[in-house]
Amino acid sequence: MSELAPFVLFFIAALLAAVTQGTLRQLILLATPIITGLHIWLNIDVGLLVTHSIMSYELTVMRTDKLSILFAYLFCIASFIAVIFSLHVKDTKQHVAGLMYAGSALGAVFAGDFITLFIFWELLAISSVFLIWARGTERAIKAGMRYLVFQVMSGVLLLAGALVYYHDTGSLAFNHIGLEGIAGWLIFIAFGIKSAFPFLHSWLTDGYPEATVTGTVFLSAFTTKVAVYALARGFAGEEILVYIGVTMACFPIFYAVIENDLRKVLAYSLINQVGFMVTGIGIGTALALNGAVAHAFSDVIFKGLLFMSMGAVLYRVGNINGSDLGGLYKSMPKTTVLCIVGALSISAFPLFSGFISKSMVMTALMYEDYGYLWLLMLFASAGVFHHAGIKIPYFAFFAHDSGIRTQEAPTNMLIAMTIAAGLCIFIGTQPQYLYALLPWQVDYWPYDTTHVLAQLQLLFFSALAFVWLNKKGLYPPELRSINLDAEWFYRKLLPAGAQRGVAFLSHAKEYAMAIIIAPAQGVRVMFSKSPAAKYHLSESWPTGSMVFWIATILAAYLLLDIFG
């Protein structure tokens, strides 16, 4: 058993990546997640605690159980795929930021106390924003700033909640928290921001589509999944999460259907999938919690695959708007096939990874008598098939022949997408291997006749609805437009309100000055006409004369003060 925290290996690799280049750097990038994964598998056992005392505080830098180890394996797999996808990139800061970001995610899931969690929580924010800024456009810079504001706000709330929690309990241990006091609510909102709760989600849909081609793949894997882990650790069984999760699963569908930027469609789809995880955590049973973490595992891989396929299109074409694409299957057939595998996985087709994890949450909803919420989640399942399962591959590769002829994706991108696609199929056909890693004991098998037939019927009729709406011209067309949702409040309402507030204060100042100055001018005019105005003191004096008289008055005052 080793006490070496896995994040240390990623941080060392980030330093090495900063001072190396070429083949040596690529070897470091590839070796880091492999070595870290092997280190976790061979040297880290369940129940390990590594603590350090700092200024009378006992900090647990590594606390291992099946939940943290499952997410650690997931982050090693995700970083390995993302590294392969980005091997062609020459930008040092992107490689360093990616390794620091992945290492921070590992540090967060092994953190056993709030101070350690806060440190990695903030490192997640600081390292990830460079993957947005690295794109270099004005839109990316501004989106990165807005992204950072939300991330830092989450950290501030987490720290405030941790301090209140320590004051109330005398402990900094990060275990189940609950919503009993102000500390719980502060920490809950901090986790909610990173989970992209409704009205707190716009950093994701605003920032992710503006990141670099490879940066978005990293971003899709870590921040929201660390937050899902934190919710499962601290707030399992809180019923409010069921309703929040159902809302998250449903509302992004409407925005994703009308969105033209296909990477932004996937950003909305990411919120939709996290909604299933949050719902499972809120239900709180062993089946639901296992479903939540299993779906997090599946989502990182199939969502990463979809982001990679759209990233490959953006890399080759320079555009990712659905209105400008189409017919790319002729130039990029391999990318097309791999994208379809991701689309089938996110749509929860039988034999693909989404089917074996999403079904656990849906079954748990039925077991706990959330029948009406189950219907809403069924609608959400059909919706994700529309906007991610059909819209993404259809408008990118098939909708019409845009006339674009380009090259297939680079070899490293194809390898990364093939690994992800293979995992989607392997997990979907052999779910017992993922189920064996799940933290809670439960007896569940997804491939029963009723469930398979019900899911196939849902997908069939959803596809039929898409075809009918498209043929009738009722399906929302791909338009060159900018769609705002919750960010309208701070990108439109607040600036407009601030401008009107400044204008109001300016007018108020002018009005007040008019009220004050008018009488004063009247008095001055009256005084100028009075006999007193003819006295010598009312006339303008030269500057030198004024200085002389001021000096005389001061001298007289000093003499009176000394001898008086």
Image (cartoon, rainbow, N blue to C red):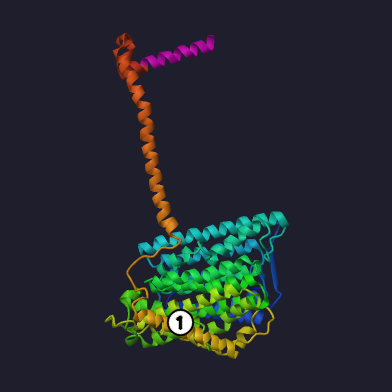
Residue 288 within the segment the image draws in magenta: no
Rendered location of residue 114, percent (x, y): 64, 62
Residue 558 within the segment the image draws in magenta: yes
Badge 1: how crowded within 10 Å, few (<14), some, or many (20+)?
Answer: many
Of 29 and 263, the residue lying toward us: 263
Residue beneath label 1, please? 462
Count of labels in the image: 1
What residue range appears in magenta? 548-564
Let me know if residue 9 appears in the view. Answer: no
Q: Which corner quadrant holds the C terminus? A: top right
Q: Residue at x 49, y 80 (%)?
A: 346
Q: Residue at x 39, y 87 (%)?
A: 334
Q: Which corner quadrant holds the N terminus? A: bottom right
Amino acid at pointer 1: Ser
Relative to 344, does residue 264 appear above or below in the rendering? above
Rendered location of residue 8, percent (x, y): 59, 71
Task: Quadrant for residue 312, please give it.
Answer: bottom left
Task: Quadrant for residue 353, please give it.
Answer: bottom right
Let me know if residue 401 appears in the view. Answer: yes
Rendered location of residue 297, percent (x, y): 56, 78
Rendered location of residue 173, percent (x, y): 69, 63
Secondary structure under badge 1? Answer: helix
Relative to 131, does residue 335 appear above or below in the rendering? below
Q: Residue at x 39, y 74 (%)?
A: 262
Task: Quadrant for residue 337, please give it.
Answer: bottom left
Q: Residue at x 44, y 56 (%)?
A: 490
